[in-house]
Image (cartoon, helix red, strand yellow):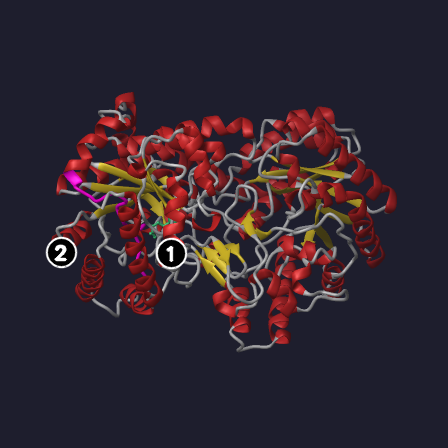
Amino acid sequence: MTVTVATLGFPRIGPKRELKFALESHWAGKTDAPTLLATAAELRAKTWARQAALGVAHVPSNDFSLYDHVLDTSVMVGAIPPLYGWTGGPIDTAAYFAMARGTQGSSGEEACAHGHAHSHGHGLPAMEMTKWFDTNYHYLAPEVSRDQAFALSSTKPVDEFLEAKALGVHTRPVLLGPVTFLKLAKTKDEDFSPLSLLSALIPVYAEVLTRLQRAGADWVQIDEPCLALDLTEFERGELRRAYGALSHAVPGLRLMLTSYFGGYGDNLSTAVNLPIDGLHIDLARAPEELDRVLSASREGLVLSLGVIDGRNVWRANLPALLDRLDPIVSKRGGDRVILAPSCSLLHSPVDLELETGIDPEVRQWLAFAVQKIEELVILAAALNQGRPSVAGHLAASQVAAEARRTSPKIHDAAVAARLAAMTPAMAKRTSAFGRRQAIQIPRLDLPAFPTTTIGSFPQTEDVRKARSAHGKGELSDADYATFLREETARTVAWQEEIGLDVLVHGEFERNDMVQYFGEQLSGFVFTKHGWVQSYGSRCVRPPILYGDVSRPAPMTVEWWRYAQSLTDKPMKGMLTGPVTILNWSFVRDDVPRSLACRQIALAIRDEVVDLETAGAKVIQIDEAALREGLPLRRGDWGAYLDWAVECFRLTASGVADHTQIHTHMCYSEFNDIIAAIGAMDADVISIETARSKMELLDAFEAYAYPAEIGPGVYDIHSPRVPAVEEMTDLLKAAQTRLSSGQLWVNPDCGLKTRKWPETRAALINMVEAARIVRQATGVA
Ligand code: GLN
Ligand code: ZN
């Protein structure tokens, strides 16, 4: 009658990003496929051994992937788009990577300033990549057609089960469930829903399950995170149909159904009544759901309680968790309770042991993947053998929780006082947009269709080398500053020379648009090895927001002042907005996200005001991640957008009417949030629109968006230089939807991932396109 521990998935990339380096060396042609596969097998072996040694009873297999587990699933079921010329049979690594990254080698894949992938090019394009639920992990969207046939085309789940078995580890294989798989699938066919392929897909899943059972598996984990989304009655019926068929096909094999990133909500009764043997609940996101699950589920159902937060980095308060778990275990029986992280640990950094540089006080509050497993094992031991058996661990956990709760490092009375003194007026500009515009136009004296860029200029090898040398102490502060000043001066002079209207300094001093600010604000720490997979071999190291946020000193004013001193044209002040800083960080779990965001907003507001005082007439506040913070359930959108918009306004509203506030968002699906975008009340917004050929302006037209807009006229994710005519065509398309007086001319996003030659050529063409359109419109 013992409580056991499961993990739903472990980071694949390796404690020191071993997989990343193996992949990149293979892609660069330096190592062959067998070498890469050997490294991958070694990583799997270590991961299994490590989890088993820590005391995990249900160690996952098939959670590993060379690139992405959704792509693996497409390959498993033989959903390979025709484009890749597959004619059946096993899919080799070359074909696999062609789907993942296109066939242009390293230039087949481009990342925008924050690791969001795009593909393009002349060889085979990569499959479409999009964000995995509300995480910063990106998956390759399955692509299916109306007459899609499925066939078992990869035995990876079985192979990896047997591989672990040979190493002495009995694993619980993980599959992405058929309903979620089809819900994530895209199609080019009209009037066709991928979910209608379910009947064709089920036999392939049945075959995989049968083979797993034959190989010796007793439990299989099937992930259906679509259960955390809004589902239709039809979709719920399809879940019942799918699991009815699968349980029928493989009697005796036990299915653990998981969903995560939220509660089941109105899908709960569907979930608990499926013919499954176990059900996982994300108790980090939906702690209130536990009682409902307990009362709704039949007695024999094994419950996997996701009590440790797999999406954040905080150490748990174990005695407090035990107080909740004790009655459940005594009532249900230990063998019907499994303890688990709330979701796969894919979204968590690997091992806190490697972080020797973090402030020790903050460090004792943290837990990465390995530490989260240790916590689960301690909880299970306390439940099975009694709390005294792990008394020392429990006491340490409680001491850390108490220290964190009361630490002066976290709680800053001045920040609290400032928040308490906040008034609604602080989130409002003095006058409405129309009046502000009337004041800004003569002050800025810009031509019609003013030209500008989004902020960053190429981060060349030289820039990266200098930054890294400075970081290692090989380049003095003074020499590094001189280097950055020279880069900035050259960039400013060049912008002037080609005739851009509103200039930028180029952001050469910034490593990353969030990290740069986090490092200068109080309340953040940074890790050395806290990498989390973003997609493929790309990893990010999110800042950790642990305490009250304030801004000890101006962060960008000196750079702005220097850049403005080099030109008479307006120089934009360039900041990252509070919602983006929040959404790209690990955040506190002891205060609501909205409160943490307000603190960041007040800190950035100080910077906005200081830039204005220094003389900046134009200030851009980037909110690249505002949209991706949208909750998974539509019903929660309003509350999120309310505080997100309020925080942006709080940041932007400390300035006089004559100061022009820009914002930038590097995406373009605005239809469903256009009212919130309007409510942000920026004077100018720049967005990504080139690839959609300005269709995305429809939302702004329909909403009668009153302020100014810079729809990106060229795609910065590719080195391709757009012709002048292409951009004039796009501007003309924009003119059919918006008035000429509203339009700005700029690229889709920052230029940091580009090289100088194509940047020069493209911007020269862009300035020419603006000139032509001015002339054609009679405003030149
Ligand atoms: N100002 C930033 C840059 O140009 C914006 C980047 C982004 O939106 N992702 O790099
Ligand atoms: Zn952008």
Residue in the picture at 63% in, 32% down: 325
Q: Amino acid at mark 2?
A: Leu
Q: In terms of image quadrants, where is residue 601?
A: top left
Q: Which residue is mark 1?
A: 725
Residue in the picture at 22% in, 48% down: 556
Report x, y in % for residue 105: 52, 69
Quarter of the rendering occupied by the N terminus: top right
Q: Mainly helix, strand or loop, the magenta region?
A: loop
* First of labels 1, 2 by sequence position: 2
Q: Which residue is mark 2?
A: 566
Q: Amino acid at mark 1?
A: Glu
- Of 482 and 333, which appears nearest the observer? 482
Looking at the rendered structure, the secondary structure element under dot 1 is helix
Looking at the rendered structure, the secondary structure element under dot 2 is loop
- Of 336 and 575, which appears nearest the observer? 575
Report x, y in % for residue 151: 79, 56
Report x, y in % for residue 298: 78, 29
Report x, y in % for residue 6: 66, 47
Q: Which span is picked out in magenta?
A: 443-458
When the figure is inspected, residue 465 is found, relative to residue 532, above or below; the finding is below
